[in-house]
């Protein structure tokens, strides 16, 4: 017979066996109950039940007491004051007409202009959004969702369990903060979710009079620009980051797409832990010019095949590093016919080490897949293919060489930023996720964002079963197969989370052996194309779903199925073949899939009639057009029609269908059919959902522990949404990558199993293994936190430099013509000052200064523009003049020039030029880099005199050139930007090299971070100095050499 186990899951009775000469009892699940009676007596059962009951009561009391003691409890309690205010306003808001409700937006904006704060209007604004969502979406914000919206508005992270409606919660904070007109970004993890939320939640915002924008991967600049200027913009984190970087590579203000000079105002980040923590280790990079070393990668790949792990090189799985042994170095040098792998003139070390990394750590169907002759990265967090992303530092080329693919040329970084640095640019940032509390300290330290646990609307009754650990992978997969088979026999839906394409397909093969129908969801195109359909059906009776990773999928698994997705699927099945000829054939594996055993939706007669009418209307439309539509256009028409059904009532749709017009009412016909089919699907899903709940709900199986408990919790959160029943179990083996990666000592477990039984497939269940596994995950979390912390600390150095360069760049692009000229004058003065300051000493008389060198360098950069009067200045004249000026008690800065030396050309006419001259003088006098001394005033006057001479000569040269003022400013702006970009790119390369090299200084008992800061600051100062000098030299050469001008323009462009 079948009995209930102690875990509460209905599994077959355990089979007991005696091990060796001991009296230990070992359990192994079987699919068929044993014939022997249970060994537990009724007394044992009774005592066990009483003990269990007492433990549950004590645990419940302890949990309640802990909640009362927590700060989170009191914070949430305080938010209920806002909830009460919103609820009190609801009856009044409900009485408003649609026009009156929409008019509230303009009313709020006027109140803000008159001095009101967002806090003053928060309760009323939330009540307005709640009512708008109820009218447009049929969804009313629960009280806990009002709390979630308030948490977001306060710039905190709202931790809300899966299924609690985070997407709807975001509308509250987004609407309130968009009223200022400065723009709100709602950031998701992919294009699909951004589009879904913009269309779905956008109905609420558009109804209330706000503009809603959407950023997608293939959009042109003009589309991006208009969408960023909307009140609320939906985008994904990758597009947002690259738009920011591309804007800071733009050559003119017309190429900018974001809201400059303030592109960031308020941001809401969905799955904030995934974006800021999981992806925080990978900086966003834009690559530039290609390297010429592509031919070295295939050679290095062949060398890597010759080298043997353990003999020629060692690996560190934890940080994916490789180190060559003496034997490996000797063999590689012999094979490559070189004396030194690290020879700067013939560098092979980087290529060989990358080839070894590709060989050891980058596996096909795990880290990447091969499609159309390209190696495409699989995002380890979402399981999605990222076609436009490439590994940096030559790793991607090494992988291509290993697989025998065409090598795409190596490149250099021209712009980079980490997600941490990107999102710290928001004056106010918030986030939402189902799992963030374990990382609260990190969020507080880096972003000053506390994590607030928002209560669930309904109490969670999900059961998290003990982890099952096996010695071998074979034992683990056999157990997973057996558990799936048992659940399938009951009819319960099962979701299995795997860590790679390879593992999902291995388990699929095992299930095909026992003829279990199932669906696969991984990075392969044939599965990814059916993602929405697969997720929509994952909660249906008998549904078995194997997924590489459900984190970030963004779609709730509803027990009984998702009626809206099923209704849309029925519409597309009936209409696409009529509207379009090129409907793609979805490639699926041979064998049973879940769709073949799921119950069919019974479509009623009225729905069938409306579907037939829609099909007929589709034929008329195609006939009138003279051709069928493209597949994408056909799908778009169906999606727009479904959206119409949500915003237009049935009565109005019927009027549109019955109207006699020249245009066939295809949209209203499809919308009516959808509404009717939706009712059938809702009835079916509700009935099936009740059956699934009675069976125990969705069962989730994790086939490996992740490097963070938080990611495991994301998978667990797929079961038991909104108070539904459900259960979860993680099954691991001591051969999993995680155990090897972190050098987890598994010998004790293997020895334990060998003492207990000769069967390696026997699971280990107990407090000891749970404690070891928890410790392993905590160690992994600490390790990766240290990596992120180190990355942030190093990036903070670059962050300051990046902000200075990007702010300067935007000022040049967005400023008026006068601001551009002022930059050039400042550059010229700075170049002159640098020449002087490195050749003088404020404490010594000018006769000890290197005046000859000063004149030589000054003439060297400005000889093309200096007039003939300056040629008469000699070292003796300059010394005499400086000696004479030293005795002056005061000078007239506006009319100043060194005594007995030529006057600068008279170009400083007008208030603006005199004001500019005076500002430069103040800058010279306040320069802290110059030490004080008796002759400091003489140095200042010399800097002013030569600076004035150079600037005035430059202005005269431009005037004599005859070019228009607009053309002159265009050239000046182009030279400023291109020169800055060129040196900034070189600086990034140097900083990346420094980052790699500075760690070696640890062996010299020096702090790598401090060394990086010191050298990075020195590099940056040198870069700015070189930028100024080259900019000045380029402009002077441009205006003085007409024949060279065209060449320079071509180089700049």
Image (cartoon, rainbow, N blue to C red):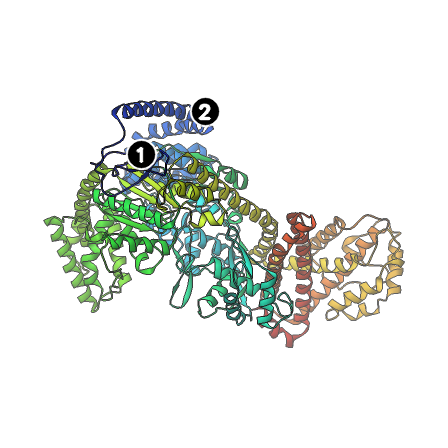
Local crowd size for mark 2, using a 10 Å CA cut-off: few (<14), some (14–19), many (≥20): few
Q: Examine the rendering and report whether any part of residue 148 can be seen.
A: yes
- Tell me if 520 is positioned left or right of 185 in this view: left
Tell me the quarter of the picture where residue 66 sits. top left
Label 1: state its secondary structure: loop
- Upstream in sequence: badge 1 or badge 2: 1
Q: Which residue lies furthest to the front in this view?
A: 21
- Tell me if 600 is positioned left or right of 249 in this view: left
- Residue 394 appears at what percent x and percent y? 53, 63
Local crowd size for mark 1, using a 10 Å CA cut-off: few (<14), some (14–19), many (≥20): few
From what the image shows, is residue 755 above or below residue 523?
A: above
- Residue 507 appears at what percent x and percent y? 32, 53
Marks 1 and 2, how far apart in space? 30 Å
From what the image shows, is residue 215 above or below residue 767?
A: below
Label 2: state its secondary structure: helix
- Residue 35 appears at what percent x and percent y? 21, 37
- Report which residue position mark 1 lands on: 7
Tell me the quarter of the picture where residue 763 sits. top left
Please give the name of the residue rendered at 76% of the width and 68% of the height, measured from the top-left corner: 860
Please give the name of the residue rendered at 86% of the width and 62% of the height, measured from the top-left corner: 878
Q: Residue 569 carries which label?
A: none
Q: Examine the rendering and report whether any part of residue 156 can be seen.
A: no
Q: Residue furthest bottom?
A: 1043
Q: Nearer the viewer, residue 434 or 660?
A: 434
The quadrant of the image that shows the N terminus is top left
- Report which residue position mark 2 lands on: 69
- Residue 941 appears at what percent x and percent y? 80, 55
Camera-side mark, 1 or 2: 1
- Tell me if 700 is positioned left or right of 739 in this view: left
């Amino acid at each position: 017979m079948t009995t209930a186990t102690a875990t509460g899951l209905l599994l077959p009775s355990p089979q007991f066996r005696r091990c060796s000469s001991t009296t230990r009892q070992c359990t192994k699940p079987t699919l068929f109950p044993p014939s022997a009676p249970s060994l537990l007596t009724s007394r044992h059962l009774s005592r066990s039940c009483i003990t269990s009951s007492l433990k549950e009561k004590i645990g419940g009391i302890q949990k309640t007491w802990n909640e009362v003691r927590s700060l989170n409890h009191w914070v949430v309690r305080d938010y209920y004051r806002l909830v009460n205010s919103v609820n009190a306003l609801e009856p009044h808001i409900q009485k408003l007409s649609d026009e009156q409700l929409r008019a509230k937006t303009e009313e709020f904006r006027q109140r803000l202009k008159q001095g009101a704060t967002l806090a003053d209007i928060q309760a009323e604004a939330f009540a307005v959004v709640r009512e708008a969502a109820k009218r447009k979406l049929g969804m009313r914000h629960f009280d806990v969702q009002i709390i979630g919206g308030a948490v977001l508005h306060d710039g905190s992270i709202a931790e809300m369990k899966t299924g609690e409606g985070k997407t709807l919660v975001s509308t509250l904070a987004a609407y309130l903060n968009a009223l200022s007109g400065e723009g709100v970004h709602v950031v998701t993890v992919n294009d699909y979710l951004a589009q879904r939320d913009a269309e779905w939640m956008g109905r609420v915002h558009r109804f209330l009079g706000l503009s809603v924008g959407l950023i997608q991967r293939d959009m042109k600049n003009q589309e991006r620009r208009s969408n960023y200027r909307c009140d609320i913009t939906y985008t994904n984190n990758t597009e947002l980051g690259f738009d920011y970087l591309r804007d800071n590579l733009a050559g003119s203000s017309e190429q900018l797409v974001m809201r400059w000079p303030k592109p960031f105002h308020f941001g809401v980040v969905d799955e904030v832990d995934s974006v800021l923590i999981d992806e925080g280790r990978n900086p966003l990079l834009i690559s530039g010019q290609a390297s010429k070393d592509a031919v070295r990668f295939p050679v290095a790949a062949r060398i890597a095949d010759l080298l043997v792990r353990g003999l020629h090189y060692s690996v560190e799985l934890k940080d994916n590093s490789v180190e060559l042994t003496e034997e490996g170095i000797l063999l590689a040098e012999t094979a490559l016919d070189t004396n030194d792998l690290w020879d700067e003139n013939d560098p092979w070390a980087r290529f060989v080490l990358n080839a070894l990394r590709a060989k050891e750590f980058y596996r096909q169907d795990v880290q990447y897949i091969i499609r159309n002759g390209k190696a495409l990265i699989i995002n380890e967090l979402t399981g999605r293919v990222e076609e436009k992303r490439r590994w940096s530092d030559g790793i991607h080329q090494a992988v291509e060489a290993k697989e025998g693919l065409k090598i795409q040329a190596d490149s250099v970084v021209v712009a980079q930023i980490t997600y941490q640095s990107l999102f710290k640019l928001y004056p106010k940032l918030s986030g939402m996720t189902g799992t963030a509390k374990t990382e609260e300290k990190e969020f507080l330290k880096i972003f000053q964002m506390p994590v607030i646990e928002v209560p669930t609307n309904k109490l969670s009754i999900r059961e998290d079963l003990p982890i099952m650990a096996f010695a071998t992978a074979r034992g683990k997969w056999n157990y997973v197969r057996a558990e799936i088979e048992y659940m399938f026999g009951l009819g319960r839906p099962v979701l299995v989370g795997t860590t790679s394409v390879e593992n999902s397909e291995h388990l699929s093969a095992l299930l095909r052996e026992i003829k279990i129908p199932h669906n696969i969801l991984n990075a392969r195109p044939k599965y990814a194309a059916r993602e929405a359909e697969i997720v929509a059906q994952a909660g249906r009776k008998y549904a078995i779903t194997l997924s590489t990773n459900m984190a970030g999928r963004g779609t709730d698994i509803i027990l009984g199925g998702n009626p809206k997705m099923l209704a849309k699927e029925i519409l597309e099945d009936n209409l696409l073949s009529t509207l379009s000829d090129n409907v793609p054939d979805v490639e699926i594996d041979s064998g049973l899939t879940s769709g073949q055993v799921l119950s069919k939706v019974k479509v009623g007669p009225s729905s069938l009639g409306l579907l037939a009418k829609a099909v007929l209307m589709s034929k008329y439309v195609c006939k009138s057009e003279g051709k069928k539509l493209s597949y994408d256009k056909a799908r778009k028409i169906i999606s727009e029609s479904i959206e119409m059904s949500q915003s237009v009532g049935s009565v109005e749709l019927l009027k549109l269908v019955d109207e006699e017009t020249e245009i066939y009412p295809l949209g209203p016909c499809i919308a009516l059919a959808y509404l009717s089919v939706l009712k059938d699907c809702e009835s079916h899903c509700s009935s099936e959902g009740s059956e699934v709940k009675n069976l125990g709900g969705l069962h989730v199986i994790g086939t490996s522990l992740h490097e963070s408990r938080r990611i495991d919790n994301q998978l667990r959160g797929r079961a038991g949404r909104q108070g539904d029943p459900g259960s979860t179990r993680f099954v691991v083996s001591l051969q999993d990558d995680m155990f090897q990666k972190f050098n987890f000592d598994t010998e004790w477990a293997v020895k334990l199993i060998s003492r207990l039984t000769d069967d390696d497939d026997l699971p280990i269940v107990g407090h000891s293994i749970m404690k070891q596994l928890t410790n392993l995950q905590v160690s992994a979390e600490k390790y990766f936190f240290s990596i992120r912390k180190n990355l942030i600390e190093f990036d903070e150095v670059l962050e300051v430099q990046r902000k200075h360069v990007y702010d300067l760049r935007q000022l040049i692009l967005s400023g008026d013509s006068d601001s551009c000229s002022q930059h050039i004058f400042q550059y010229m003065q700075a170049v002159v000052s640098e020449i002087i300051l490195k050749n003088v000493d404020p404490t010594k008389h000018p006769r000890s200064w290197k005046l000859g060198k000063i004149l030589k360098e000054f003439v060297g950069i400005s000889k093309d523009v200096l007039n003939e009067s300056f040629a008469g200045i000699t070292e003796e004249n300059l010394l005499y003049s400086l000696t004479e000026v030293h005795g002056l008690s005061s000078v007239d800065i506006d009319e100043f020039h060194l005594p007995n030396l030529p006057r600068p050309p008279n170009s400083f006419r007008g208030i603006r030029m005199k004001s500019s001259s005076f500002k430069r003088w103040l800058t010279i006098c306040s320069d802290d880099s110059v030490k004080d001394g008796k002759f400091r005033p003489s140095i200042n006057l010399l800097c002013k005199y030569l600076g004035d001479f150079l600037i005035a000569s430059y202005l005269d040269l431009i005037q004599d050139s005859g070019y228009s003022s607009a053309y002159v400013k265009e050239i000046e702006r182009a030279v400023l930007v291109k020169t800055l970009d060129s040196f900034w790119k070189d600086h990034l390369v140097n900083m990346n090299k420094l980052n790699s090299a500075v760690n070696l200084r640890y062996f010299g008992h020096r702090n790598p971070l401090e060394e990086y800061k010191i050298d990075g600051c020195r590099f940056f100062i040198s870069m700015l100095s070189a930028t100024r000098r080259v900019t000045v030299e380029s402009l002077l050469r441009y205006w003085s050499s007409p024949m060279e001008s065209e060449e320079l323009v071509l180089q700049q462009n």
